[in-house]
Image (cartoon, helix red, strand yellow):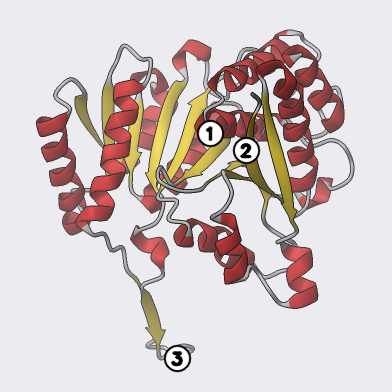
Amino acid sequence: MVKSYNIAVMGGDGTGPEVVAEGLKVINAAEAKYAFKLNLTKFDFGGERYMKTGETIPDSAIEEFRKFDSIFLGAIGHPDVKPGILEKGILLNIRFKLDQYINLRPVKLFPNVDTPLKDKKPEDIDFVVIRENSGGIYTGMGGATMVGTKDEVATHVMAYTRPVVDRCLKFAYEFAKKRNSKKKMLTLVHKTNVLTYCGDLWMRAYTEMGNKYYPDIKQDYNHVDATTMWFVKQPEYYDVIVTENLFGDIITDLAAMIQGGLGVAAGGNINPEGVSMFEPMGGSAPKYTGKNVINPIAAIMAGAMMLDYIGEEKAAKAIEKAVIDSLLSGKLKSMSAGRMGMGTREVGDLVASYVK
């Protein structure tokens, strides 16, 4: 019996539809081999639709998303739309309303991928960042008064409740417990020496949960500024990292660079009890739209993450192996757009051929 999954697909803006097409091409190569089927429903939410209708994403679409097994996203961001409108109206709207409270970011250097870190190899860069994805400063608490005057005041509040912190920490501890790593270490990243209220909440919750339920997981702590230094100096130190929303947003971009760039970085917005969304970490890159030069590896890996999360672990592993085999083939010259030595579609064909 072939298993079937219902997947919502949002190509989004710019090069998003192009990389999603290659991700789906590679998944299609795995479907027959591993006896599963994706039933795809495409949605056109993004900048073009917004400019035509003034609509980002209606509540009816959010409700429709709840019926799917997962969401596969390309990219959101349009040069003719003011920054923040699409990001808040679509991305944050989906994350918050579908309660995708975990942002899962594997950070892995693949063979034959350049890293700006001197002498670092694939075995040195292989860790995971778990970012709390629904609380903190991004919830929009705050305001402004006397705007435009010399006495203007603006506030933006970082707010966390104990349940929101606890559920993120539980996910992180469970992930560290199951991860195939000798370190078995969970590093909490915060700024407890300055953000004493939120920092204290995270630290107490982290320590209490670890001591009571996860005594086999080594507890570790870094200030966020120190973390950025250690990512560069000694990335091999890390195993699993857990952090709050804003800090996670920042350090995962640095992490993407040390693993070879946004062209290879994939992530998931996870609701462990509901519908999750997977995407490449790069933006919409509108200047490359339609030129067949954008790197689809991140989208292909996002597709592999999606398969792993819906239960098709063998297919997910096969796709990751196919990506590695493609990189080892020497046919891909670079991870940068326009310098790969082949086009977007040709990279998808290459990876798909290794899956087959």
Cα distance between the residues tagged 1 and 2 = 8 Å
Label 2 near label 1: C-beta < 8 Å?
yes
Q: Earlier in the sequence, mark 2 or mark 3?
A: 2
Identity of the amino acid at label 3?
Answer: Thr
Q: Who is closer to the viewer here, 167 or 62?
A: 62
Quarter of the rendering containing residue 5:
top right
As drawn, the label of residue 5 is 2
- At horizontal 31% and vertical 11% (from top left) the residue drawn is 182
Left or right of residue 146, residue 88 in this image = right
Left or right of residue 54, residue 163 in this image = left
The quadrant of the image that shows the C terminus is: top right
Identity of the amino acid at label 2?
Answer: Tyr
Q: Residue furthest right?
A: 291
Q: Who is closer to the viewer here, 305 or 131?
A: 305
Q: Earlier in the sequence, mark 1 or mark 3?
A: 3
Label 3 near label 1: C-beta < 8 Å?
no
Residue at mark 3: 149
Residue 314 location in percent, x, y? 57, 17
Residue 261 location in percent, x, y? 62, 32
As drawn, the label of residue 310 is 1
